[in-house]
Amino acid sequence: MEGSTTGDRVSAEAIELLEALLTGDDPVHRGLRAQIPHLRVTGHCTCSCASIDLGLDEALTPAAPVAGGPVVAEAEVVDADGQPIGGLLVFAHAGYLSRLETYTWLDQQITRFPAPDRLR
């Protein structure tokens, strides 16, 4: 990842995806959703994909009780015909959202975040 200007606002598309992926009523998803209003983009992937690094002032919200690995949510991304083309991963580090990552199974990168209705 190559750093961007620290403090860039998270796009509306990325916020919609985070909200769609963190829908669980468990304490982890509730805690991570509470962080969304405080997030800032801290970096962008150096390839052409839409992946972003996330950060926030940890004094603004408590850490979520994340246990296990760093991936806290994931979904498959489908094209307009409903065919799988890749996926999205949401990462957390030390209880704080840290990355929204896209990946593809095609030759072409996912360069824009998909609409939530393209998630399975």
Image: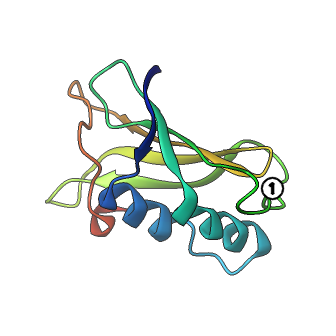
Count the numbered circles shown: 1
Task: Tell me the residue at 40%/51% (across/down).
Answer: 10
Expressed as whole percent of the image width and height from the top left, the position of residue 104 reads: 34, 35
Left/right of residue 71 with respect to residue 113 in the rendered view: right
Q: How is the image coloured?
A: rainbow
Expressed as whole percent of the image width and height from the top left, the position of residue 22 reads: 57, 67
Task: Tell me the residue at 79%/62% (across/down).
Answer: 62
Left/right of residue 79 with respect to residue 104 in the rendered view: left
Residue 120 in view, yes or no: no
Q: Quadrant of residue 38?
A: bottom right
SS for dot 1: loop
Residue 9 lies, with reference to residue 41, above or below; the image says: below
Residue carrying label 1: 66
Residue sitting nearer the eye, 106 or 31: 31
Crowding at mark 1 (Cα within 10 Å: few <14, some 14-19, many 20+): some
Residue 109 lies, with reference to residue 64, above or below; the image says: above
Expressed as whole percent of the image width and height from the top left, the position of residue 60 reads: 70, 60
Q: Quadrant of residue 54?
A: top right
Query: The C terminus lies in which quarter of the figure?
Result: bottom left
In the image as oriented, which residue stretches furthest toward the bottom?
Answer: 25
The amino acid sitting under disc 1 is Val
Residue sitting nearer the eye, 68 or 60: 60
Expressed as whole percent of the image width and height from the top left, the position of residue 28 reads: 75, 66
